Image: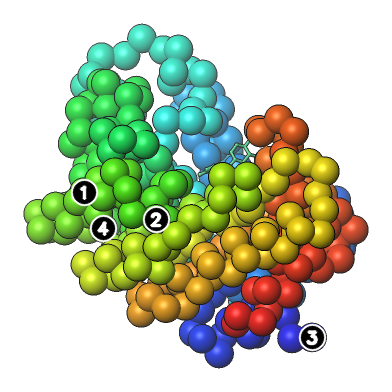
């Protein structure tokens, strides 16, 4: 069997995975597969604000640096994740009592210092993550409340200034198909680019659940973004199910992975397809969605599931 990264290279596509740094350090088969199957990696948690600045002004890039070095040794690109988000913020920030001016300066420094630290070593940055509600209005977050909608353009400008060669992405979930949320993202990206804001790409997270039915129109939706001239990427694919798993659910799951990959392969400017972890041994799903699981392409013992075979066949 040729590894996914080799199959994807024929399509000039990077195939990536989110990496759990504890597993990478402690689990040799995990480490070996992370290096051999994928041509791009995303830190699952260690580049998030709470991880790199747990106390104000005290930066800790050690774990993120380890992943960047791992990637470089394995000929992999790094998707930086994530600069501006409402979640996984340090408590000194969310519980602090700051003026709007102070918060804007705190955000500017966070974006600038982080991007500068990794300058030249990050392929894509997820600059702004999950800024919209399902109805297409902007999410009520500390950033929207305190800084207003302009924080989005500001973040892209600051990131670009700090590393002009990194490709800058807007990233979100439930935007894989056409609807109020993806319409809003399309509109945002079109407007920002018209204003000269350096937005290079849109990341479709790709967190699906088979109990909702698989989405339709995903390829056509990717085309709408492609037509704007921006790059696209599937950034966090996983397809969860209500446990226990059975053969039919695993077949539907495989179709879910396949439709996401197909949409990417059919979009001219879709440059990477990343899974949010590659084994059911380590997954955020059971901890986040009660009673759900088995969302990944390999099982807990690293055996390929139908989903892995589907990706292999489609590449
Ligand atoms: C998740 C991680 O997988 C978990 O380990 C963590 O506890 C919470 O965050 N969208 C994103 C990712 O952009 O950063 C999230 O990752 C999953 C949803």
Task: Quarter of the image for the N terminus: give it.
Answer: bottom right
Q: For the residues marked 3 and 4, what is the alpha-carbon distance in whole angstroms?
A: 38 Å
Q: Horizontal placement of 9 versus 93: left or right?
A: right
Q: For the residues marked 1 and 2, what is the alpha-carbon distance in whole angstroms?
A: 16 Å
Which one is in front in this view, the residue at disc 4 or the one at disc 1?
A: 1
Task: Quarter of the image for the C terminus: give it.
Answer: bottom right
Q: For the residues marked 3 and 1, what is the alpha-carbon distance in whole angstroms?
A: 42 Å
Residue 7: x %, y % from top left: 63, 85
Q: For the residues marked 4 and 1, what is the alpha-carbon distance in whole angstroms?
A: 10 Å
Q: Is residue 95 above or below residue 162?
A: above
Number of residues whose C-alpha sits closer than 10 Å to that of mark 1, classed few (under 14), some (14–19) or many (20 or more) = some
Q: Residue at x 47, y 24 (%)?
A: 56
- In terms of secondary structure, where does tag 2 sit? loop
Q: For the residues marked 2 and 4, what is the alpha-carbon distance in whole angstroms?
A: 21 Å
- In terms of secondary structure, where does tag 3 sit? loop
Name the residue that disc number 1 marks: 188
Q: Looking at this view, is 313 or 100 the one in front?
A: 313
Which one is in front in this view, the residue at disc 1 or the one at disc 2?
A: 2
Q: Residue at x 25, y 21 (%)?
A: 146
* Tag of residue 168: none
Name the residue that disc number 2 marks: 177
Which one is in front in this view, the residue at disc 3 or the one at disc 4?
A: 3
Name the residue that disc number 4 marks: 199
- In terms of secondary structure, where does tag 1 sit? helix
**Does label 2 point to a residue whose CB lies under 8 Å from ligand 1?**
no
Name the residue that disc number 3 marks: 1
Q: For the residues marked 3 and 2, what is the alpha-carbon distance in whole angstroms?
A: 32 Å
């Amino acid at each position: 069997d040729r590894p996914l990264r080799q199959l994807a290279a024929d399509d000039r596509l990077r195939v990536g995975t989110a990496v759990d740094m504890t597993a990478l350090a402690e689990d040799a088969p995990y480490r070996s597969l992370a290096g051999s199957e994928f041509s791009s990696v995303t830190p699952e948690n260690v580049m998030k604000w709470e991880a790199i600045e747990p106390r104000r002004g005290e930066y800790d890039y050690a774990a993120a640096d380890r992943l960047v070095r791992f990637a470089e040794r394995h000929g992999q690109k790094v998707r930086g994740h994530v600069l501006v988000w409402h979640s996984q913020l340090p408590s000194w920030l969310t519980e602090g009592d700051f003026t709007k001016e102070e918060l804007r300066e705190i955000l500017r420094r966070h974006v600038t210092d982080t991007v500068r630290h990794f300058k030249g070593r990050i392929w894509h940055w997820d600059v702004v993550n999950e800024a919209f509600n399902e109805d297409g209005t902007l999410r009520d977050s500390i950033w929207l409340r305190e800084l207003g909608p302009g924080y989005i353009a500001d973040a892209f400008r600051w990131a670009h200034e700090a590393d002009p060669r990194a490709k800058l992405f807007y990233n979100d979930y439930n935007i894989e198909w056409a609807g109020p949320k993806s319409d809003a993202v399309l509109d945002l990206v079109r407007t920002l680019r018209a204003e000269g804001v350096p937005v290079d790409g849109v990341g479709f997270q790709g967190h699906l659940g088979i109990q909702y039915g698989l989405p339709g129109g995903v390829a056509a939706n990717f085309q709408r973004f492609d037509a704007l001239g921006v790059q696209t990427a599937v950034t966090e694919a996983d397809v969860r199910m209500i446990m226990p798993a059975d053969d039919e659910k695993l077949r539907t799951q495989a179709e879910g992975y396949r439709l996401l990959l197909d949409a990417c392969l059919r979009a001219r400017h879709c440059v990477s397809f990343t899974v949010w972890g590659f084994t059911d041994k380590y997954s955020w799903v059971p901890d986040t969605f009660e009673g759900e699981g088995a969302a990944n392409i390999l099982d807990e013992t690293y055996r390929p599931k139908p989903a892995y075979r589907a990706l292999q066949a489609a590449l």
